[in-house]
Image: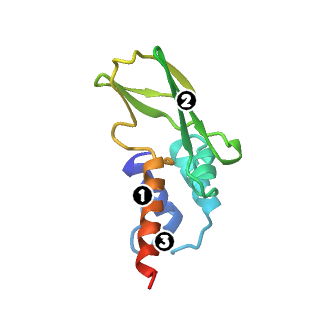
């Protein structure tokens, strides 16, 4: 979406205009659905899928990955199998490409593959879950007399 369009949508949501100036706006109370409609209009396309997955459902999308000696297959999995056409960057031997998922890439075991190399996409990460479990265990140890 980019900063310019995001902040334009937020200004419209808050003030009712993309160009608020003293005297030409009144703060408004709006709903999430109002914001979705504004974002769709500003972007010129329907992004309801984004809000359905990130705002209206608690679990983050999971990236299913299957790799063997000749291919890597990537696909999104969401709660209730909601549509999630989020593109994803993948670096193969240093060359970054943007993929629409599901996708299968021809790779060898020698290829260096980095999925989401710049960590742009918010997704479920087992390393985060493992860390949170570890932290809870540490806190439980500290609470014992």
Front of the two marks 2 and 3: 2
Q: Which of the 4 image quadrants contains residue 56? A: bottom right
Q: CA distance from mark 3 to mark 1?
A: 46 Å
Q: CA distance from mark 2 to mark 1?
A: 28 Å
Q: In this image, 31 relative to 1: left or right?
A: right
Among the two numbered marks 3 and 1 on one chain, the one whose residue lies closer to the N terminus: 3
Residue 122 visible here: no
Q: Which residue is mark 2?
A: 101
Numbered disc 1: secondary structure: helix
> Quadrant location of the C terminus?
bottom left
Horizontal and vertical percent position of residue 108 = 40, 15
Q: Nearer the viewer, residue 132 or 83?
A: 132
Q: Which residue is mark 1?
A: 131
Seen from this angle, which residue lies furthest right?
A: 80
Residue 50 visible here: yes
Q: Which mark is residue 140?
A: none
> Quadrant location of the N terminus?
top left
Seen from this angle, which residue lies furthest left?
A: 94
Among the two numbered marks 2 and 3 on one chain, the one whose residue lies closer to the N terminus: 3
Horizontal and vertical percent position of residue 106 = 46, 14
Residue at 55% x, 51% y is 60
Q: Residues within 10 Å of mark 3 (few under 14, many from 20)?
A: some
Horizontal and vertical percent position of residue 13 = 53, 63
Horizontal and vertical percent position of residue 71 = 48, 17
Question: Which color scheme does this rendered protein use?
Answer: rainbow
Q: Residues within 10 Å of mark 1 (few under 14, many from 20)?
A: few
Numbered disc 3: secondary structure: loop
Q: Which residue is mark 3?
A: 25
From this view, report whether residue 84 is shown above or below residue 72.
below
Residue at 43% x, 49% y is 127
Among the two numbered marks 2 and 1 on one chain, the one whose residue lies closer to the N terminus: 2
């Amino acid at each position: 979406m980019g900063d310019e369009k995001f902040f334009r949508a937020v200004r419209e949501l808050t003030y009712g205009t993309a160009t608020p100036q003293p005297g030409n706006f009144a703060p408004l109370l709006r709903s999430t659905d109002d914001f979705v409609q504004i974002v769709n209009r500003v972007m010129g396309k329907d992004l309801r899928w984004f809000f359905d997955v990130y705002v209206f459902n608690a679990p983050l999308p999971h990236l299913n990955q299957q790799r063997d000696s000749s291919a890597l297959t990537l696909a999104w999995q969401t709660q209730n199998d909601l549509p999630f056409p989020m593109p994803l960057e993948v670096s193969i031997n240093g060359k970054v490409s943007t993929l629409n998922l599901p996708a299968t890439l021809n790779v060898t075991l020698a290829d260096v593959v980095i999925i989401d190399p710049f960590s742009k996409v918010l997704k479920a990460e087992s390393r985060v879950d493992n860390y949170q479990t570890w932290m809870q265990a540490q806190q439980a140890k500290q609470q014992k007399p």
